[in-house]
Image (cartoon, helix red, strand yellow):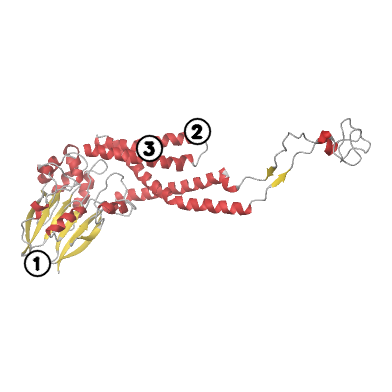
Amino acid sequence: MFAVLGFVATLALVTGLIHLYLWKRLVRDTTTAGRWRRAGTIAAVGLAVLVPATLIGTNAGMYWLAWPGYLWLALMFYLLVLLAALEIPLLVTRLVLRRRAAGSAPEPVLAGPATPASVASGPANSATPASVASGPANSATGSASGEPTSASTPPADEPAAAPATVGAARPDHDPSRRLLLARGAAIFAGLTAAGLVGHGVRTAFGPPQLDRVQIRLAKLPRSMDGLRIATVSDIHIGPLRGRVHTEQIVAAINRLDADIVAVVGDLVDGTVAELGEAAAPLRGLRSRYGSYFVTGNHEYYSGVEEWVTEVDRLGLRVLQNQRLEIAARGGVIDLAGVNDVSATGSGVSAPADYAAALGDRDPSRPVVLLAHQPVAAVEAAKYGVDLQLSGHTHGGQMVPFNLLVGLEQPVVSGLGEVDGTKVYVTNGAGFWGPPVRVGAEPQISLVELRAE
């Protein structure tokens, strides 16, 4: 529970900063002071609060928060990515406009001090002294030589009027131009983000795609060539996916007629009391040599002790830092499983123990390890594991966030290798958080082992 609260607190801080940026780009830069800006500010604050409220509320059973909260989380992510990507083009556009405006701006016209009215138009017989321009030669105060009178000469201690610049404001500083650019960027980002999220929702709730992969193992007996392991992870039964989701996955796996079924963690997002009925269809899984399960990090948020008991009751053998022999087709392979690397404590909650699962075994036999997170391969490779089957990453779930997943996990999707150990990562059949998948379809994998 403390881990969840810490995660929520960190997420609240990060999303607060993100919303501040979004407010500037979508509200402040696109509106003038007034009621529309006030309304946008109130909306930004409300949406910033919605994200942590959704995470806390759904864990407390307020599932009605899931749809608005998680959909906004997806929109928020894509608005952030798109607006950040537009920063450089907008900057270049502003610089180009400024340079063009500087090159085409007219030269400023300087106007001198105002001419006294008496000089400009005073009549010859005016009572006021006449200037040289219009006064007669016999004026009482003027001179025939054209000297100006004392009335038209400013006092010595009075400063001359400053020259005035005549011309229009520079276009690159025109507020209407800046407003137009900001609104254009906001409209583009908003429409694109909405389109991506809409497509992602449709994909996330669509049927899982089948990925068939052949993996050669040097130690695999030739009699076991073609042994098939149906692999699924991250089903994430929870507030947005229930019993029907589980039934679809079970039916898809059974159509594969696999030799072994491996469920590699993150089965649920809730307790047995909340989701036991939704998980019940797992009892119908069919395979020749058994169905197996290892814990993922989300099991430890959802009451791992109860779920281990429940999954075992449904007919899946839970491999908790254990190894067993699979005798098939005249040959033998070792199938091992470790608890998730995030596990802490003792008993069912004990951390991953690679020595218990992989130590003291016959090195001539191939070993397939079930481990929820791909990063477990860093330790597993030290024990000569031939193949590790994992999930956890969701294939990134929402491009381009697969790039961030790659900073933590050595393999994000598909087949890779870590220190000589082959690692296959399935994308997962469900989703966590936003009900959105972009660039990473839900997936069930059929791994076919081939002898070299």
Task: Tell me, yes or no, whether the two marked residues, 2 and 1, touch with CB atoms within 8 Å.
Answer: no
In the rendered image of this protein, does residue 51 appear above or below residue 88? above
Please state the horizontal and vertical placement of residue 229, each as a whole percent of the image: 15, 58
How crowded pointer 1 is (Cα within 10 Å; few <14, some 14-19, many 20+) is rated as some
Which residue is found at the position 53% from the left and 45% from the top? 178
Residue 228, percent from left and from top? 15, 61
Q: Residue furthest top?
A: 127
Of mark 3 and mark 1, the one earlier in the sequence is 3
- Answer with mark 3 or mark 2, whichever residue precedes in sequence: 2
Amino acid type, callout 1: Pro
| Left or right placement of residue 86 versus residue 410 in this view | right
What's the amino acid at mark 3? Leu
Separation of marks 3 and 1 at Cα, in angstroms: 58 Å
The disc at residue 131 is none
Quadrant of residue 156 within the rendered picture: top right
Q: Is label 2 in a helix, a strand or a loop?
A: helix
Q: Is residue 362 left or right of residue 187?
A: left
For label 1, the residue is 221
Check disc 1 and report its element: helix, strand or loop.
loop
Residues at marks 2 and 1, CA–CA distance in whole angstroms:
74 Å
Label 2 sits on residue: 35
Residue at image location 26% in from the left, 57% down from the top = 413
Q: Tell me which amino acid carries mark 2.
A: Arg
Tell me if label 3 and label 2 are in contact, CB under 8 Å.
Answer: no
Q: Residue at x 25, y 37 (%)?
A: 5
Classify mark 3: helix, strand or loop.
helix
Q: Which residue is mark 3?
A: 47
Q: Earlier in the sequence, mark 2 or mark 1?
A: 2
Q: CA distance from mark 3 to mark 2?
A: 18 Å
The image shows residue 45 at horizontal and vertical percentages of 39, 35
